[in-house]
Image: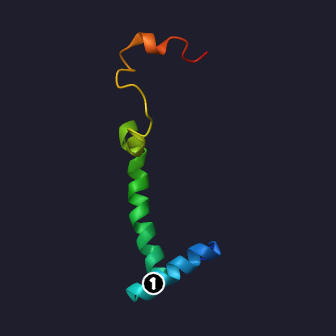
Amino acid sequence: MTTMSLKVPDALDAQLARLAQRMGRSKSFLVRMAISEFLPKESRGSRSSFLARALDLAGSVAAAPDLSVNKRKLEGYGR
């Protein structure tokens, strides 16, 4: 196994230490677990759809329900 060192903000280190204590695991174990979950998702991410990437934004803007089909409401938009 390769050894790696990294710098993390103090707040993140404290959060990681609390979780490690609570779970009875080492901080190294938790970091390895997080990285092993992150990398496969990120490598698939480039092939994901725009909807999948922006799903948390859907419905976050208050607007008229017929905005996409009512051309009158789009007059002057973008000027």
**Regarding mark 1 in the picture, which secondary structure is present there?**
helix
Which x, y percent locates residue 12? 57, 73
Tell me the amino acid under the disc marked 1: Ala
- Above or below 47: residue 30: below
Q: Nearer the viewer, residue 73 or 6?
A: 73
Q: Quadrant of the C terminus?
A: top right
Q: Nearer the viewer, residue 37 or 79?
A: 79
Q: Residue at x 43, y 40 (%)?
A: 60
Horizontal relation, residue 4 to residue 23: left or right:
right
Q: Quadrant of residue 78?
A: top right
Q: How many marks?
A: 1
Q: Quadrant of residue 58?
A: top left
Horizontal relation, residue 10 to residue 40: left or right:
right
Q: Residue at x 45, y 67 (%)?
A: 35
Write down the residue under mark 1: 20
Which x, y percent locates residue 23? 38, 85
Asked which colour scheme the image uses, the reply is: rainbow
Q: Nearer the viewer, residue 56 or 45?
A: 56
Q: Taking the image as drawn, is residue 3 in sight? A: no
- Above or below 62: residue 25: below
Q: Quadrant of residue 22?
A: bottom left
Which x, y percent locates residue 44? 38, 50
Q: Taking the image as drawn, is residue 15 in sight? A: yes
Q: Residue at x 40, y 37 (%)?
A: 50
- Above or below 66: residue 71: above
Neighbor class of circle 1 (other Cα within 10 Å; few <14, some 14-19, many 20+) is some
Which x, y percent locates residue 63? 42, 29
